[in-house]
Amino acid sequence: MVRKIIEPLRGETLKERLRHLMFGIDMEGTRFTLALAACLWSVMLLWSGDTFDRPTYNVMASIANELTWAMLFGLQGICAFYSLLAEKKNRFLFNFDAVLGCLLWSGSCIAMLMSVYPPPAAISAEIAAAFASWWVLVRFSVDVKDGGNAD
């Protein structure tokens, strides 16, 4: 019983599976999730009330106000959705989305981590999004090769 559970995790199988997960699949699912998360961040920041009055957002508030962050996250989400849904792929939009996503997700995570100690457990998803955004930046060309027609 235990052998059947552990067998798929043997060295070669695990290495091949990780290689496939990292380099063999397209990034559309990741990009869709990041686009949705960016739009949700935008909506939450536009919600009435002062989100940035909370200590977790002190550093973010010193960089820009809530409206600016909301507009940037909204822009990134809209660009990401557009680049996913458009029939014709646009290399500039891929680059813009990837760079803006990295800046927003990394910047907001670093700012929140600098604002309070110990770090809030609730930002673990944002940290994962920051790593995912960097991975999208590194691998964005996967979406335009093999069938994509980027200009």
Image (tube, rainbow, N blue to C red):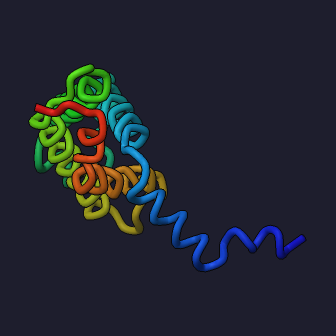
Foreground of the two, 134 or 91: 91
- Which percent across, then down, holds residue 8? 70, 68
Image-based side of 4 in relation to 22, left or right: right
Q: Residue at x 45, y 65 (%)?
A: 19
Q: Tell me where residue 62 appears, x and y as whole percent.
A: 13, 50
Residue at x 21%, y 51% (from the top left corner): 102
Q: Is residue 132 visible?
A: yes
Quadrant housing residue 87: top left
Of 96 and 147, nearer the camera is: 147
Asked whether residue 45 appears in the rendered view, the answer is no
Q: Quadrant of the image for the N terminus? A: bottom right
Split into 4 quadrants, where in the image is the C terminus? top left
Q: Is residue 120 left or right of residue 1?
A: left
In the rendered structure, the answer to whether residue 11 lies left or right of residue 47 reads right
Task: Give the residue displayed 35% in from the left and 52% down from the top.
Answer: 132
Q: Nearer the viewer, residue 25 or 74?
A: 25
At x 38%, y 38%, the residue is 28
Q: Is residue 80 above or below residue 85?
A: below
Count every numbered label the image shows and give the total.
0
Would you identify the image quadrant in which residue 124 lies?
bottom left
Q: Position of residue 30 (x, y in %)?
A: 40, 43
| Residue at the extreme right | 1
Furthest residue in direction front, as rendered: 146
- Vertical relation: 100 (above or below) 55: above
Residue in the foreground of this view, choosing between 81 and 22? 22
In this view, which residue lies farthest toward the bottom?
11
82 is higher (above) or lower (below) than 101: above
The image shows residue 92 at horizontal and vertical percentages of 9, 36
Determine the image quadrant of residue 97.
top left
